[in-house]
Every structure is written in C-alpha cells, then in structure tokens.
Image: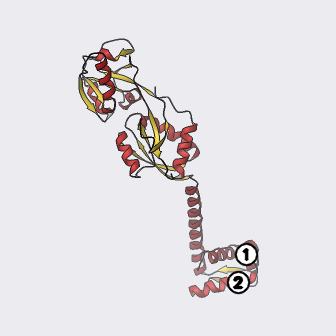
C-alpha cells in the first residue's frame, strides 16, 4: 500500500463510481480498478461493495477511508511545512541579546518581523557581549546583538543607533538640578561602571588630573543600577539601559564633556550559510526604521 493507492482509494470512496473517480484522477478506468483489486489483495480484506450503479464501502473500507484522510492530510502538512521552512516562512530563529539595549530594542524588532513572518518562533539567549560572541562561535545562536566594536574579519553586522551615556543615582547622592552633567563633576563620587567603559572613564579623569573613585565594575548593567538605587554610588550606563529597572526613582542626567556614546549591532558569522529565517531577519533589520536608543 502506497500513497498513490490511498489517493486512488479515496477518490473511489468519495465519488462512488470508478468512472467518476478515474475522471477526477485523470486516468483510465482499467488501471484504477486494478489498483483497487491489488489493494484489497494486499490487505486481505474487502474494502469496496461493488454494484453496477454504485460502489460503497465495507466496514473495513470506512476504517481505511478515515485513516487514509489522516495520512494524506499529514503528508500535505509536512510538505507545506518543509517548503515554508526552506523559504524562511516557518522555522525557529535563535538570537543572542545583550542585557541592556538589546533586551529592550528586540521586542519592537520582533513585532515588525512577525508582521511578515508570523509562523517563525524564537529562542533567545542572554548575556554580555563576550558571551554572545561565544554562543555565535559555538553555533548555538544564529545572530546576536552585541556592543561594538567587534572583529570585522570574523563578523558581519548592522549597526544600531548610538546611545549616549548617562549617570544614574539616588536623589540623596546627586542634588544638581541641571539635566546634563560634565563627567568631571563626579570626581568625588563613588562610581559604578560597566567594565566595557572602564578604560574610557579612567583616561578622561587622568587627562584632567584626577583619579576616578571606582567603587564597582561589573559585566552586568542591572546590579549597577540596583546599587545606585540603594545610594551606594553613581552608575554610568547607556541611556537605554535605564529602563531595565521598572518604576525606578533614580535621578538620571546626560553626561557631557565628554559626550560618551556607545554603539550596538546585530552581528553574524562571516562566510557561513545562515538559516533563511536569519537572512530574512537581517534584511528586515537593514531596511526598517529602528527606534532610536537615545
């Protein structure tokens, strides 16, 4: 019993006449009748009740009809899914995201993507930039959001709009009313900084003849914001990262002199074949107007 025989059998069962079934299948009556006989012989049961005017089903025939419908529906569904997957219409996209801007930017990007590819699902992996690079290199994710710079000989990327750096502190720590604040004004404050910006901050203070008071460095943004909310110091973080703490009462001010910015990007491995879903995502990311991070 094969798929062709099941299709032939269903046509006969539904039409009630071999002639009509043969017309529907675009074949002659003789080979169709022969296939029905072979199917009954293979199964060792009578499937069809034949009269001159009509062909009905035996009890065994009704069982086979129901199962054949299920089998053929499953085959058609499998064929559709395979084609959709091959065309990137269906499938799973594995994305790595950094813990600050990437986590907040991604939902808006996903929303736009699903408008065109509603059958795609997602698997998210989270970490700092180094962790995302490790996941990419291990082929555990397809694409990733990271902080720039990255090695352009290893990765292709699409840049995300730059973010300005801000300071965030408890109101008891910072009382200055201005919306912007020169970095040098923080020379006496205990600073909470992301390890990625440690060199920039040290260089700036040293150029101005001061030694920064670094209370804490971290690979994660949220602990820095949490410490600053407890009044332990002043966090220096990307502006978009402020939203990582919901309902926060932190005082936030833009840092000027210098204006310190940071850039993110969507990256993927060079010279490797990406899943079609990832290619669609990258192309959309290139073309769409992304929400500003600053």
**Which one is in front, 203 or 96?**
203
131 horizontally vs 72: left or right? left
Element type where label 2 sits in the image:
helix
Measure how far apart labels 1 and 2 are at the Cα level: 10 Å
The location of residue 53, given as percent across then percent down, is 76, 81
Give the mark nearest the N terminus, 1 or 2. 1
The location of residue 108, given as percent across then percent down, is 50, 36
Which of the 4 quarters of the picture holds residue 70? Answer: bottom right
Tell me the residue that label 1 is attached to.
21
Tell me the residue that label 2 is attached to.
33
Above or below 178: residue 265: below
Element type where label 1 sits in the image:
helix
Q: Is residue 250 visible?
A: no
**Mark 1 residue crowding within 10 angstroms, few (<14) / some (14–19) / many (20+):** many
The location of residue 201, given as percent across then percent down, is 32, 24
Above or below 30: residue 125: above
The location of residue 117, given as percent across then percent down, is 56, 47
């Amino acid at each position: 019993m094969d798929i062709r025989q099941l299709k032939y059998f269903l046509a006969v069962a539904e039409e009630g006449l071999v002639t009509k079934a043969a017309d529907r299948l675009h074949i002659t009556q003789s080979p169709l009748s022969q296939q029905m006989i072979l199917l009954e012989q293979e199964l060792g049961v009578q499937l069809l009740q034949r009269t001159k005017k009509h062909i009905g089903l035996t009890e065994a025939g009704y069982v086979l009809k129901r199962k054949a419908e299920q089998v053929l529906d499953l085959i058609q569904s499998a064929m559709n899914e395979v084609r959709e997957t091959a065309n990137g219409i269906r499938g799973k996209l594995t994305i790595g995201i950094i813990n600050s801007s990437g986590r907040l930017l991604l939902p808006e990007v996903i929303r736009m993507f699903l408008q065109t590819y509603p059958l795609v699902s997602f698997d998210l992996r989270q970490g700092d930039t180094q962790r995302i690079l490790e996941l990419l290199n291990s082929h555990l994710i397809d694409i990733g959001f990271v902080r720039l710079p990255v090695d352009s000989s290893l990765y292709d990327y699409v840049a995300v709009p730059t973010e300005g750096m801000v300071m965030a502190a408890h109101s008891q720590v910072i009382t200055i009313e201005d919306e912007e604040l020169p970095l040098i004004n923080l020379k006496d404050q205990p600073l909470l900084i992301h390890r990625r910006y440690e060199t920039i901050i040290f260089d700036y203070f040293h150029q101005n003849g001061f030694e920064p008071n670094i209370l804490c460095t971290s690979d994660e943004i949220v602990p820095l914001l949490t410490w600053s909310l407890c009044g332990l110091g002043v966090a220096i973080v990307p502006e978009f990262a402020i939203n990582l703490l919901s309902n926060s009462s932190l005082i936030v001010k833009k840092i000027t002199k210098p204006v310190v910015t940071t850039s993110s990007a969507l990256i993927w491995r060079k010279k490797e074949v990406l899943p079609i879903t990832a290619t669609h995502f990258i192309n959309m990311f290139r073309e769409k107007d992304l929400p500003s991070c600053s």
